[in-house]
Amino acid sequence: MSFLTVLYACIFYAATAMFVGGLALKIRSYARTPAPLKIPTTPAPTTAGGVVLRMAREVALFESLFKSNKWIWLFGWLFHVSLLLVILRHLRYFTDPVWFWVVWAQPFGTYAGFAMVAGLGGLWARRFLVDRVRYISTPSDHLILALLIGIGASGLGMRFVAHTDIVGVKEFFRGLMTFNLQPLPADPALLVHLSLVALLMVIFPISKLLHAPGVFFSPTRNQIDNPRDRRHLAPWAAAQFESGAKQD
Amino acid sequence: MAAPQFEVPKLTGYAETPAIKENATAHVKSFPANAAIQEGIGFPGELVEDWHDKAIAKMGDLLGKYRSLRVFMDACVHCGACTDKCHYFLGTADPKNMPVGRQELMRGVYRRHFTFAGKYFPSLVGAKDLTKELLDDWYKYYYQCSECRRCSVFCPYGIDTAEVTMAGREILDTVGYGQKYTNEIMGKLHKIGNNLGLPGPALQDTLEGMEEDMLDDTGVAVKMPLDVKGVEVLLVTPSADFFAEPHVESLMGYAKVFHAAGISWTLSTTASEAGNFGMFIGSYANMRRAALRIREAALELGVKRIVVGECGHAWRVAYSFWNTLTGVGHGGEDPFSIELQKQLDPRYPAPQHICEFTYDLIQQGKLKFDKSLNDHRVITFHDSCNVARGSRMGDMPGGQFVIPREIIKAVANNFHDMAEETIGEATFCCGGGGGLLTDDLMEVRVKGALPRMEAFNNVVQEQKVNFLALICAICKAQFTKVVPYYGFDMSMVGGVHQLVSTAIQLESEE
């Protein structure tokens, strides 16, 4: 087995462990931290079903962002939806036989790659062109955009410019999944693509990419507007203030 | 009105987003609290020696207690959606008044101390050490936020800068760096029972004066009961209603509604304040302590219902937090809340807003109005931020927008809304909320009112509006003071129940 194959196998096992483990730790900390007060941004749904719908609109359509700014919404939504299609398309490299709906998503996912890079380009342009956004942009904001564009561009290059040995790639990843290492094709574009993806997985739980799990835990979006009908009390507040509260 | 020491923005007829001007309001700093004020509400009297470590420790404490803060510190992607949403940014152009700019003051320190990337690659992710300069920035800019939550409407993750501001103020208080205005009032509320420090006898006196005024005006003996046991309703209202103009006009309006409906009611000397500045400073302990006065008064007086007067943040605290803090509400399953809730009438929401109360009576046909008595007024309605985005009225989401407008339309003939993007959930703060209603912050108060003044000016020009109807004591005080800077007369400002008071027919009562 070549050094390259072992190296990338190690990289992907480590990246997956950091991605899954890091994200699990973060999600656990969000879930375990209580929200001591009812703070939904109103008007808010008064039922649990309403909250599910509100969150679904937020996650699928970026409802609040649409209210806020049509340009950011356009570029942001384009990027995220394209990324979703691209990821679905990539499932074909991890499944055998390929699921029928992944086959169905294939053409959409292929061209979504362009839309994804275009959306990212629009978001990046705003960081230079809008003075308010320029002011708040940190180096990491630029680098994450560069990373995502790098992933998109290297992927598109392999699909439309210089094909890589995609059958070999699939065998490598199927091998990783069954702990049965298969050789990784030594194509530079592929190595760049895979390195950047691994890097993205590693930084996910320690960066602003935490907005993905975060939105589901946002109390202004996930709370039911029913404070007059249900008493809502956090454990720490009950312990601090009501353990000795007069109950005579 | 003294000549301002700053440039008052010009009304142009359309809302503009300014180009950023760094440090435009870095010179605006409200007076810090002295030792007596700080210690009176349980905080150190002056900046403690080890303030840095104490502040970081407090931040860690709050991160463990408030999911909002924990999620909001991580989730921001610097997308820029909020950057043109804050009235203080629109009025001052200072980028630290952009919601994300204000949040970053804390997020930088959060990253430095609580994240891997900030500990090892601080400059890459914008992590900052908490220096004395940064602490001063916290103080300045966390007291240039009115906690109005407008940004939270527009953030794709619902990040609410009010939560960050509250945490910032709580940390500042914990290290002995509090604000005079808010904390002094907090202390008065604990000590005397209301924000103005009005003792019982003074209150009694004021109420008797109002009874005489109403008798002179209407020929009907409308009562203003105080500390009466066994009545139906306890009315809790902001103490400004007892003596400030135009607030008193609304208080008399509530009294006339109770009179006309024939529902027995009382005010309380010990619970003579609906306002609760504990929310402004993010202090759960102070907010709870203040709110317990209402619980105790309700238990002592044996009332069946609790109604809250026209006050924005008070209504948020009452509607959203009273059940949590004091058991004023329904659905409690623990002895502490059941003790009170078994006394409250389950047919009515607890607490109930005075607008819900009046609206229900109108719906039932129990109130009669002569709308023509308001014909000299052309009215518009300003949605108060805390009512709009932190509470509700009625059964339906958004009832807080419908009910006050329906009341106005029931008592007056001339009503016009301001532009849609400036009302409802997108309403602009008056510029004086959240603990900023103090003269030492006049510059940001005037500049922060700019977006509202633009929208108001447009209906004044186009619809001949001459009355700005409000349901918030702070809005009333702020606009009374600030509209003259923009060339309007302060008599244009008033309450929704002031309009009710003008039109209500007391003779028709049985």
Image: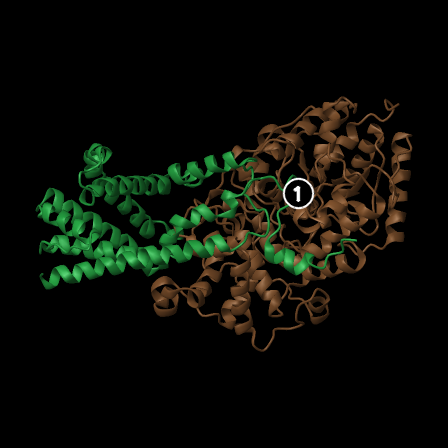
Chain colours: A green, B brown
The chain carrying label 1 is: B
Question: Visible in this render: residue B282?
Answer: no
Q: Is residue B3 visible?
A: yes
Q: Residue at x 65, y 31 (%)?
A: B403
Query: Pointer 1: what residue?
Result: B319
Image position of B113 (left or right of B433):
left
- Quarter holding residue A156: top left
Determine crowd level at label 1: few under 14, some 14-19, many 20+ residues with C-alpha closer than 10 A.
many
**Quadrant of the image occupied by residue B340:** top right
Viewer-proximal residue, A235 or B178? A235
Residue shown at 90% from the left, 30% from the top: B220
Residue extending farthest to the bottom is B49
Q: Amino acid at mark 1?
A: Tyr
Q: Position of residue B389 (x, y in %)?
A: 57, 42
Q: Nearer the viewer, residue A16 or B199?
A: A16
SS type, badge 1 = helix
| Quadrant in which the C terminus of chain B appears | top right
- Residue B41, x across and y down, in percent: 70, 64
In depth, the one of B397 and A129 nearer the eye is B397
Of A113 and B11, the residue lying toward us: A113
Q: Position of residue B484 (x, y in %)?
A: 66, 45
Q: Position of residue B33 (x, y in %)?
A: 67, 66
- Horizontal side of B133 relative to B291 (left or right) equals left
